[in-house]
Amino acid sequence: MTSDDGFRGLHLFNTMTREKAPFRPLDWGPEGGISEGERQVRIYVCGPTVYDYAHIGNARPVIVFDVLFRLLRHLYGAEHVTYVRNITDVDDKINARALRDHPELPLNEAIRKVTERTAAQFEADVATLGNLAPTHQPRATDFVTGHPDGHDMVTMIARLIAKGHAYEAGGEVLFDVTSMDNYGGLSRRKLEDMRAGARVAVDAHKKNPGDFVLWKQSSPAEPGWDSPWGRGRPGWHIECSVMSAAYLGETFDIHGGGLDLIFPHHENEIAQSCCAHGTDQMAKVWMHNGFLQVEGRKMSKSEGNFFTVQQLLETEVFGGRRWPGPVLRLAMLMTQYREPIDFSVKRLEEADDLLAGFARAAAGIEASAPSAAFVAALSDDLASAAMMAELHALRKSDPAALKASLDLIGVDLSDWQASSASAAALALDPAAIDAAIATRLDFIRVKNFAEADRIREELAEKGVVLTDGKDPESGERITRWAVKRLR
């Protein structure tokens, strides 16, 4: 084993083991035999099913794993990290949307029209949220059949049948979950206790209730590809098994996605991949972000709290204002990625205020390098509380490192630097505002709230909004200010 085992101080929580452990990439391992210049950290994340525009819940895994992608690039070098995030463009929901929106077109043309529009909007939305483009962004329809080097779904399904892990029945090809000794290892579900998961119908032709679809027949009114089992289309899970292997190999470093994908999707990916390739693992580390609620309730159209990213960016449907991409991004990152998040107007206002303060501190300053403490916080399984504490500390002690640290997590201060310019355009003197705030805090300490309110009102008349809070280190009362934004 070489002296460099690939450890760069990064610790990640692995859903498979339910433990946080040091991360060492496979290419740096003793069996790697890979030259230093060719080594890659390889990560795959399940992307969107593009039947509709991305909602704010879809944005959370994109942001979380973009931060991980950025951190890996920082630790290992951008040229040594490969990130794949797929686009699912074959799905029954897409078929239904295409029939609804374009009944005048042949189905395949209608599907292409829907998915091209929604995929383009997804890419525009996530870019506005500050996300880097992944190294590769494959579309499922390009990997159904006939792909070079056999990296296609029909080939993998045929291999599973040949190895005794899949069978034909009722016009479908199904994976036999009893053919894999450790099926259920990721979700910790016992096979005898399992019931069929999402997108899996319990039918009499299945050997076991948990057997899942690899290939299903298509009617003339449905999209389909020719295969040894007739004209049809793939099941959901097989898509990611094939696309990840095509770009990252049979076993890779990190597989990510939302908590809701652990079962059945990721469990079934593991089953297909390991059985097809004869490996004991698909990915070394499995990472999952927590659920998102909106104002304390599950997001749903029936609740009236369902918002697309585009709506939040471009309309005033949430809190009576538009929310810039960096605000939405920081609001997501203020909660540790494995924890549930309550997406609320209050949280967005807090993120907006924090960014305004960061922008004032870093105005006119060139970024230096992220602080060691900030990188250490991110390296501890993307620890949000420690990350935010370090940003607060850097605001006071090292604005150049503050700017670089925010750059590392993809938060752009340009909007708030523009706000500072707006203050100057309004003939506001930042030093005078700070002095007025200090005087107000003195009045509050002596309980002269009338004078404190007078100062707040005078500043409000000039377009300056105050937000009170506590210093995360000292616990003392602090006040931040921002120029009121036009709505």
Image (cartoon, rainbow, N blue to C red):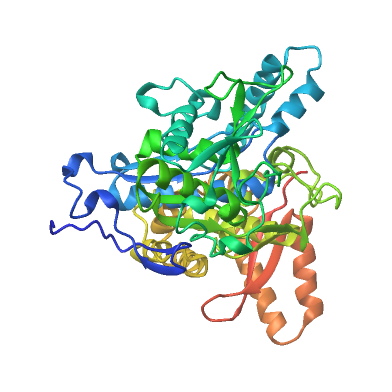
The percent coordinates of residue 33 (x first, y second) are 16, 46
Near-viewer residue (466 or 283):
283
Near-viewer residue (20 or 460):
20
- Residue 272 drawn above or below residue 182: above
Q: Exactly how many numbered labels are in the figure?
A: 0
- Residue 408 drawn above or below residue 110: below
Looking at the image, the residue that sits furthest to the bottom is 446
Looking at the image, the residue that sits furthest to the left is 2
413 relative to 135 in the view: left or right: right
Which quadrant holds the C terminus? top right
Q: Give the residue displayed 61% in from the left and 44% down from the top.
A: 325
The percent coordinates of residue 419 (x first, y second) are 62, 47
Q: Is residue 409 visible?
A: no
- Residue 18 drawn above or below residue 323: below
The percent coordinates of residue 187 (x first, y second) are 54, 61
272 relative to 320 in the view: left or right: left
2 relative to 419 in the view: left or right: left
Near-viewer residue (298 or 143):
143
Q: Give the residue displayed 63% in from the left and 23% down from the top.
A: 116
Q: Give the residue displayed 52% in from the left and 69% down from the top.
A: 385
The percent coordinates of residue 123 (x first, y second) are 57, 33
Q: Is residue 395 visible?
A: yes
Near-viewer residue (256 or 325):
256
Which quadrant holds the N terminus? bottom left
Q: Give the residue displayed 71% in from the left and 81% down from the top.
A: 444
Name the image quarter holding residue 190: bottom right
